[in-house]
Image: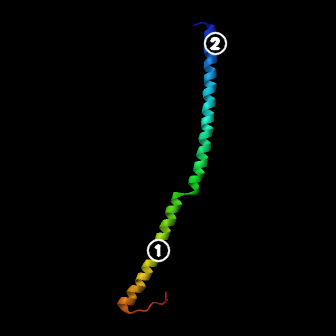
Amino acid sequence: MTAGSREEFEKIWAAKVRAAQKRHAEASNEFRKVWAENFDAHLATDPALAIRQARQAESKALDEYMRVLKVFTDLVLHNKMPADAE
């Protein structure tokens, strides 16, 4: 291999490196853009928050059911009139 051909290969591969670096930078920028758009959307619809809220609603409904069932049981079994007329 001659000195001239080596220099030509270096120039060719240096250009390939720059082109690959540019494509990588563009792809990285696009990834960050897509990630940010979708990550923000997922945070806005936080599944953990939805689960926590559903669990709290379930717990509140269970508490109310138990309260009403106790009032009903006292009424039926013990002839105890409920304090509130709900």
Q: Position of residue 2 (x, y in %)?
A: 60, 6
| Left or right, 21 with reference to 58 | right
Badge 1 crowding class, 10 Å Cα cut-off, few under 14, some 14 to 19, many 20 or more, is few
Which of the 4 image quarters holds residue 72? bottom left
Q: Position of residue 70 (x, y in %)?
A: 41, 83
With respect to residue 72, does 10 lie above or below?
A: above
Quote the CA–CA distance across marks 2 and 1: 79 Å
With respect to residue 18, does 34 lie above or below?
A: below
In terms of sequence position, does the residue under pointer 2 or pointer 1 come before the other? 2
Residue pictured at 62% horizontal, 43% vertical:
33
- On residue 61, the disc is 1
Q: How many marks?
A: 2
Tag 2 residue = 7
**SS assignment at label 2:** helix
Residue pictured at 60% horizontal, 36% vertical:
27
Badge 2 crowding class, 10 Å Cα cut-off, few under 14, some 14 to 19, many 20 or more, is few
Under mark 1, the amino acid is Ala
**SS assignment at label 1:** helix
Residue at the far left: name it: 77
Residue pictured at 44% horizontal, 81% vertical:
67
Q: Position of residue 62 (x, y in %)?
A: 44, 74
Question: In the depicted view, which residue is nearer to us: 41 or 64?
Answer: 41
Q: Position of residue 80 (x, y in %)?
A: 41, 92
Which of the 4 image quarters holds residue 6? top right
Under mark 2, the amino acid is Glu
